[in-house]
Each structure stands twice: as structure tokens, then as C-alpha cells.
Image (tube, rainbow, N blue to C red):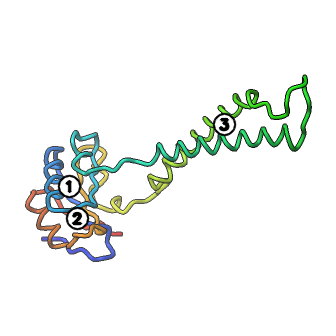
């Protein structure tokens, strides 16, 4: 019996018994032109990331921007405190003595980059997410033990339920299930 999918569903998921079957299924789906795919495995499967064509992440840019913001903010804070808010002439040095700002500026660069890395990772991964639609699929808990899942999402431009079901059924999965939204 072929599952029927509605427009408001998340997609269609197929369960496989081995990583080789999953890799073949992902290659077949990619050859068919599907681009919105996701795979769930209990351990890393070599070559799967290349088949699914994971995009480069934006974490390095987020960390760079966080570091720059921390450094610029820290330098400005020190400049404002020693030149505008409370200027004190210590030992005849100029008020804007940038070498004394470097250690704190450096520390704030590191602090800003670290906060940006953690918050950027959480934000770009969509976390915290207490519930994901694939959690409702019967037997999906085995994705952490001994099963391999390939999900074709309904957001894919080429997604047609009949076409996806036919393509997945030719690969002989253990089961094909509709993922409710």
C-alpha cells in the first residue's frame, strides 16, 4: 500500500537496513533531481554528506563578526572611560594610549567570538527544537541504533507524492511513511 501525502505534511521518509542501501537511495534521489533531502543515521556514513551536498556553513562568518563586535566594543569602552568619562593623567601619558587597551580588547575579541559561536550554532541549527516532525514516524527511534532513514521533504520543488513514492519503492526500503507536519 502506497502512502498518500497531503500538502501540509513535512515529507516522505524511507527506512533502510544498511548504510549502503541508504547511500544508493540518496544517490538515486539526487539523480532524480530532488534537492531537499535529509538522512538520519546511527553513525556517520562515508560519502553521504557529498551525495546530499551539504552547504558550507556560516559559522566562521558569525564568529568573525562576533569577534569584531567584541573587539570594537571593548576598545570603544576603554577609550570612552579613559578619555571622555573619567580622564586621569597618569605619569604624563596621553589619554588615548592604545597599547594599554590591547589586552582587554583581545580578551573581548575572544569573548565575543565565543558567544557568537555558541549562539550562532544554536540559531543556525534551529535549536533548541524540542520536537521535529520526523519524531512522529513509527520506528524512528531506531535511527539512533540500527536503522537508516532518508527523508524527501515536501518543500522540494520537484516533490510530487506519487513520483517520490514510486522512486523510493523501487529501492525496496523496509517501509515508506508519510511524515506529518
Answer whether labels 3 and 2 touch (C-beta < 8 Å). no
Q: Which residue is drawn at 18% across and 44% down?
A: 19
Residue 50 is drawn in which quadrant? top left
Q: Name the residue under label 1.
A: 15
Answer whether labels 2 and 1 touch (C-beta < 8 Å). yes
Query: Which residue in the rendered view is the most extreme toward the left?
Result: 170
Where 16 sits versus 117, above or below?
below
Image quadrant where one finds the N terminus: bottom left
Separation (CA) of disc 3 from disc 2: 50 Å
Question: Circle 2 — which element?
Answer: strand
Where 146 sits versus 14, above or below?
above
Q: Name the residue under label 2.
A: 177
Q: How crowded is mark 3: few (under 14 residues within 10 Å), some or many (20 or more)?
A: many
Which is nearer the N-term, disc 2 or disc 1?
A: 1
Where 109 sits versus 153, above or below?
above
Q: How crowded is mark 1: few (under 14 residues within 10 Å), some or many (20 or more)?
A: many
Amino acid at each position: 500500500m502506497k502512502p498518500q501525502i497531503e500538502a501540509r505534511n513535512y515529507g516522505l521518509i524511507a527506512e533502510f537496513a544498511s548504510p549502503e542501501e541508504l547511500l544508493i537511495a540518496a544517490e538515486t534521489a539526487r539523480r532524480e533531481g530532488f534537492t531537499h533531502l535529509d538522512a538520519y543515521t546511527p553513525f556517520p556514513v562515508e560519502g553521504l554528506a557529498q551525495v546530499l551536498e551539504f552547504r558550507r556553513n556560516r559559522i566562521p562568518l558569525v564568529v568573525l563578526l562576533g569577534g569584531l563586535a567584541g573587539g570594537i566594543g571593548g576598545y570603544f569602552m576603554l577609550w570612552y572611560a579613559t578619555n571622555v568619562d573619567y580622564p586621569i593623567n597618569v605619569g604624563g601619558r596621553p589619554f588615548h594610549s592604545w597599547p594599554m587597551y590591547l589586552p582587554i580588547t583581545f580578551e573581548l575579541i575572544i569573548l565575543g567570538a565565543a558567544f557568537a559561536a555558541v549562539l550562532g550554532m544554536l540559531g543556525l541549527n534551529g535549536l533548541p527544537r524540542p520536537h521535529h516532525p520526523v519524531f512522529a514516524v513509527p520506528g524512528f527511534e531506531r535511527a539512533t541504533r540500527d536503522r537508516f532513514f532518508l527523508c524527501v521533504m515536501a518543500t522540494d520543488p520537484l516533490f510530487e507524492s506519487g513520483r517520490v513514492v514510486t522512486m523510493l519503492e523501487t529501492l525496496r526500503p523496509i517501509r515508506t511513511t508519510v511524515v506529518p507536519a
